[in-house]
Structure formats: structure tokens, C-alpha cells
Image (tube, rainbow, N blue to C red):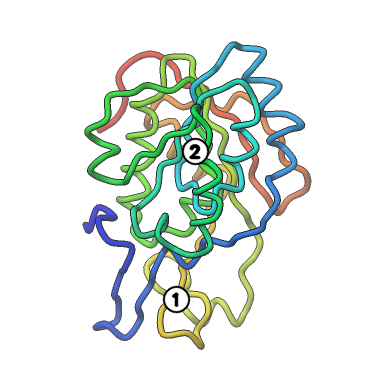
Amino acid sequence: MADWKSPIYKYAGGKIVIDVTTSISSGLPPHRVLKRDFMPYIRKLGHRRILDFGAGALRHTLPMLAYDVEVCAGEVEAAFGREVAMEALEKARRRANFSTLIWPAGFKKDGRRFDAAVLSYVLQTMPEKEERKEVVKLIAKKLVDGGHLLYLSRTDQITRETNARRVCDGYYMWPERETHSFYTEFTHEETRALMEKFKLVRERSWSEGGKEQVFLFRKQTGEWAK
């Protein structure tokens, strides 16, 4: 397991090269649930420290900073170095309530705890199943008991063309490029089972229609699976 120390993964004897940072897109608006549902809900609960894991181009970090909360963006160092993220990062660093955590070393060493976390379209871009599990495990450890995780992912995006590009338990995207991004999907049951391993229980769904998972999980007390 590479433990995401590098965003580069090689498969099929090095013929298929995946760079997870190529999934980052600039200029995307924040998901509608952020302002409409998530932020009002966690502010009502008094949550003030938020982790945005896999923050990318900070599409959710920047609008959350406008609220009276602390926001920490967690990412691989190479992602913050991509041009699509640098402008947003410069804006965020002007705010006293902004900080970063570099995955994996800095993330694991840092002792901060968070009241809430955002995991938006991240797990499905990670090709290694065990690394997805490690991400959820460590986010859960950083959440206070009773803290919340906003989880977003897509479904029903697989086509016949995509299905021809199998790698690991998913597919590589952008076949015309030298380096590709990765995509996979999870059923509602698979998502719930992964979260429940680490005492993250689904509290509510803000999904609209069948092609998106927008779930809010709450951390329970007690030991979790290793």
C-alpha cells in the first residue's frame, strides 16, 4: 500500500499511470447543500472547527471561511502545488481562520480535533481500497465524539466506454492523456458499511435524485474496527 505518499499510481506494468491530483478542477461552485443545509445545521450545533479533506481547489473551503468558523484544508502537497489550486490557496491564506494539513505525514502527526469534516468526491477518485479505508479511519479519529461528517459522491456515471477501462475496482479516465484520473462508485450500502466500521452513523440524507450521495454522518463514542 502506497499510503498516498505520492499521488502517482502505476498499474498494468506501468502502462496505466494515475495521478489523483488531476481530479482537481478550478472554478466549480460549492455544492448547494453547503450553504442550504450543512453550514446552518452545524452552526446550530455550535460546531466551529471544520476539516475539509481532499480540499483540492478549495471550492468548499473558501465559502466556509466566510462563516465564523475555523477551516482546515487537508490535501497531498502536490495538489496544493497545482496551478488550479494556487489562486484559491492564496486567497484562503489571507484569512486568520484558515490552516492546512498535508497528507499523510502532517495529517497523522497533528493532534487537532475537529467538530465536523467534509469529504466531497474524494474516495471515489482514490484507486486503492485500503487507502480509502485509512482516510475514513483517520478522519473519524480527528472528529470529536458527536462530530459530523458531510460525505458526497456520485453514482450512475459508468458507461460502456468507461467500463472498458477497468483498473483496480474502478476505471481510469481521460485515456488520451499520459496520466489519468481514477473513478469508482459505491452503493449506499457500501458507503454506510465503510463509515460504520469507524462509528460514523448516517444521521440524514440531503440527496436529491438517484445519482448522488449527500449524507451526513455522526460519530458515536466507543471503539471501532481496526
Q: Amino acid at mark 1?
A: His
In the image, taking residue 181 as reference, residue 168 lies left or right, namely left
Q: Secondary structure at mark 1?
A: loop
Query: What amino acid type is highlighted by mark number 2?
Result: Asp
Question: Residue 145 appears in which quarter of the rendering?
Answer: top left
Residue at the outermost front position: 94
Q: What numbered label is drawn on residue 52?
A: 2
Q: Is residue 45 left or right of residue 92?
A: right
x 67%, y 13%: residue: 44
In this view, 219 is above or below 207: above
- x and y percent of residue 163 in the render? 54, 77
Disc on res. 180 = 1
* Of labels 2 and 1, the one closer to you: 2
Q: Nearer the viewer, residue 187 or 100?
A: 100
Tell which of 175 and 62 is nearer to you: 62
User: How many discs appear?
Assistant: 2
Front-most of 35 and 174? 35
Residue 60, by quadrant, is: top right
Give the Cα separation between the discs numbered 2 and 1.
Answer: 24 Å
